[in-house]
Amino acid sequence: MLHLVRAVAACRSSRGAPRTLERVIWLATLLAIAAGAAFAVTAALQHRAAAAEAEHPVADPRLLLRLLRRPMWLASNLTDFVGA
């Protein structure tokens, strides 16, 4: 968000301000959509990996260890990192 504020401030001080500001807004919009899509993929992959696990007691720490061995769950965390 701070980058967007700085970009808008820079646009106001330059001669091609309207065109540059429009580009910044489009870029911010596209990045927000991409982040939302990455979050959606993350949630779906994590749900799928967790649903494939056997029944377990609530707050069982072994669940996390089992999930860490699942490639799909690890891929979902990578997607989460990319979306952030």
Image (tube, rainbow, N blue to C red):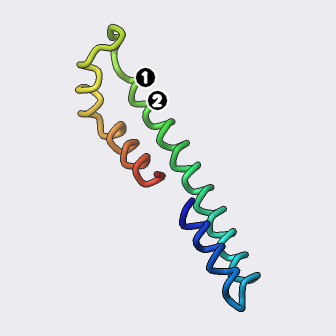
* Residue lying at the far right of the rendered structure: 18
Residue 15 or 76: which is nearer the viewer?
15
Is disc 2 surrounded by few (<14), some (14 to 19) or many (20+) residues within 10 Å?
some
The CA distance from mark 2 to mark 1 is: 6 Å
| Disc 2, SS | helix
Residue 64 or 14: which is nearer the viewer?
14
14 shown above or below 59: below
1 shown above or below 53: below
| Image location of residue 50, percent across then percent down | 39, 25
Residue shown at 43%/33% (left/top)?
A: 46
Q: Which mark is residue 35?
A: none
Query: Three-letter amino acid code at disc 1?
Result: Ala
* Quadrant in which residue 60 is drawn: top left
Is disc 1 surrounded by few (<14), some (14 to 19) or many (20+) residues within 10 Å?
few
* Quadrant in which residue 8 is drawn: bottom right
| Image location of residue 44, percent across then percent down | 50, 36
Residue shown at 57%/57% (left/top)?
A: 34
Residue shown at 35%/36% (left/top)?
A: 73
Q: Are marks 2 and 1 in contact (CB under 8 Å)?
A: yes
Count how many numbered circles sit on residues in the image: 2
Q: Which residue is mark 1?
A: 51
* Residue lying at the far bottom of the rendered structure: 15
> What quarter of the picture does the N terminus occupy?
bottom right
Residue shown at 52%/44% (left/top)?
A: 39
Q: Which residue is mark 2?
A: 47
| Image location of residue 52, percent across then percent down | 38, 23
Query: Three-letter amino acid code at disc 2?
Result: His
58 shown above or below 12: above
* Quadrant in which residue 70 is drawn: top left
| Disc 1, SS | helix
Residue 63 is left or right of residue 9, and the answer is left
